[in-house]
Image (cartoon, grey):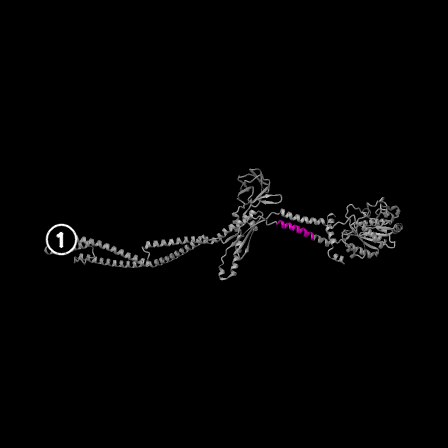
Amino acid sequence: MQSNQSFEGIDWDKLFSVVKTTKWWILLIFIGCNIAGYLTTRWTKDLYESESELKLDIKRDATALGIKTIVDDQNINVVSGEIEQIKSKVFIGRVIDSLDLQVSYYSIGNILTDEMYKRSPFIVKCQINNDKLYDQQIFFDFIDNKSFTLKLEPNEVITGTFGTPFHLRGNQLTITKENFYESQSNDYYFIINSKVALIEYISKRIAVEPLNFNANTIRIAFQDYNAQKAYDIVNAVDSLYIYYSNEQKNLANRQKIVWLNNELSQVENRMQDYENYFENFTLKNKSSDLNLDLKRTILAINKVDSQRYEMAKRITQLNETIDEIHSEKLNFSSKQYSFLPAYVNKRIEDLNKMQQDRDRLALAYNENTFAFRQKEKEMNSLMELVFQQLSELKKEWLKTSSELSARKQQLEKEFIAMPDKNTQFSKNQRFYKLYEEFYLSMMQSKAQFEIAQAGNIPDFKILSNATIPTQPLSPRKILILGIGLVAGITLNFFFIGLLYLLNNKITSAQEIEKSISAPLLGIVPAFYNSSSTEFQVLDNPKSMVSEAIRTLRTNLDFFTSGGYKKIITITSTISGEGKSFLASNLGGVLAMSRKKVILLDLDMRKQKNESFFTTKDLSKGVSTILIKKNNWQECVQETKLENLYFLSSGPHPPNPSELLLNGEFSTLLEELKQEFDYIVIDTPPVGLVTDGIMAMKRSDLSIYVVRANYSKKEFLSNLNRIQNLHKLSGLAVVLNALPASNKTYGYGYYEDKPKTKWRRFFQA
């Protein structure tokens, strides 16, 4: 019952057998996995990661009102926006501009290619005029300490001198040698990177992610195969983004200041135009107050009217005076002629006196007298002089009157136009005041923006500066080697398990006892002594194999009781299961027990050349006996073991099965039974031909050989089929080549003691 439980669980013998038969594959898988792990660590470039942490200061104005959700959402939005800004191509482009990444230098190794960032033995300076050299490998070789060679695809070779500019595909390049240059045997190449390629390169390798939305912290990391390069890029991102963030923050102020300057300039120009207008208006109108001017104009008109009235009155009086003088009706009075100038009044007064003198003279003298005529003549001369003066004065007064009329018309026109001027002037004054207020307001705003710009500080703080990584991010060598070790064990576990499940070989006696109804005659262990021969009972009589075969001989007594069962047939399903080995050794053991035994080789399809049986003549044997060419006495051979004889199969006949069907085979067996105690027949495999079954029907005992870890389980089904089909009663099974163990063979005195499983595993 205990063995059945073991069989129902894990058959350890079967498992060990599977492991032993596939030990080299197991070892190969284990070694292969570990070699793969080692090669992965050896041939994978070390990947380094430099990282830093930034904190964004966000004003929490909403917390004063208790609106926590709004603040949290604001934090998430702001942090996410800053992350996208850092990852934007515009910002990455500015990072590239701040670093020296235009040319990448590489050293070609036997397995890996190393980027010589900041440690290249040569430096390339280029002026790119076109994009024909961008993003392609340009191979570099040192010729000597002064010259070099460049190679481009396809087959373009250029030789140059260090420090001397040269042209390559329309671009000017200058290559200089570094001071640490010594004899260089490595192969190099360099790549002139386009900005698009650099942006793509950094965008793929940079990682910007939030650490804590509540704390507004951001992690910036960059991975590269060069630790110094990763550090420089992260450091550039940190320092540049603080400046960039502050610049973006001040951008609005700068734009406002620029707009204000532009608007202030325009307002100044407009105010200047208004000021020029007011100046011209004042100069033109001699006043800047139109209401006052309106009053003054009215007064001026009234004054002009008064002056015109006085002038008209004077002209009238002047005309009357002239008439009086013509009519000589002067009645001179100082008040009467006060409107006339003094010199005219003096003349008129003189004229009046002269008229009076003439009139007095006319009373005394005749008009024809000399004195009278003389006086008349003087008076006429004076009168003409007065008329002349009055005419000139009248002319002057008429002119003045005309000027006053014109002046009145001018004043009236100005008076009529003054309301429009006043309206326009007032309107311009209002606009001027508005522009003045707008100008002052913009000046104040500009001052505020300039103060805000001068006092602005970055929103970001660096919590953790970028550091040069000392340990690679990948490959993690210990982890990979551990994975290789675990993978080797795991793959072998599944490999062994799969083979265990797929293994349909017979591995134990329990499988035989459970699968067939025929009894198990015995077990023959496998032998591990490489010096052992096939004839174990003679060459190694103290071996476990010899003892097992002697046990079979003992068990035969239970099958051959009564002494009349002499014919023993030994067969198997296929060749290689050990039936010939068992036949020869069983015959040898029987012979050693002082029994006369003949070993009959009935496999006429295959010639055997056993080293322990001497075949003197291959031209005769069982096949020639069955055709009556020879008798068995002529064909039988003695062996080196006493009482053991051998009858070979003879030449290959074309019809072995038909020979066994005729009566000669039965006759042969009867004759041999008369001469020998035991007839051991080595038959062909019954799974291939029917010759063995014919022999089994004529035998007293049939031994069916099954080889451990070789014969398939389906062979047992074949055995059951043969037994039931041919009604074979004397049938027993022998399990051959079963790996020996201390558990099964614990005698301890055999010459070939069973080795431990581990020793058999490594030495089998």
Q: Is residue 202 magenta?
A: no
Image quadrant in which the N terminus is located? bottom right
* Residue 158 horizontal/vertical position (percent): 57, 39
Q: Left or right: 511 with respect to 213?
A: right
- How many labels, in total? 1
Residue pointed to by mark 1:
375
* Residue 610 horizontal/vertical position (percent): 82, 46
State the residue lying farthest toward the left. 364
Residues rendered magenta in the picture: 476-493
* Residue 79 horizontal/vertical position (percent): 53, 56
Residue 551 visible to the viewer:
yes
* Majority SS type along the magenta span: helix
Query: Quadrant of residue 104 in the image?
Result: top right
User: Label 1 is placed on what type of residue?
Assistant: Lys
Q: Is residue 490 magenta?
A: yes
Q: Left or right: 581 with respect to 290?
A: right
Q: Left or right: 51 with respect to 269?
A: right
Q: Nearer the viewer, residue 545 or 480?
A: 545
Q: Nearer the viewer, residue 388 or 746?
A: 746
Looking at the picture, does residue 419 appear above or below residue 537?
below
Residue 158 visible to the viewer:
no
Query: Quadrant of residue 326 in the image?
Result: bottom left
State the residue lying farthest toward the bottom. 66
* Residue 132 horizontal/vertical position (percent): 55, 44
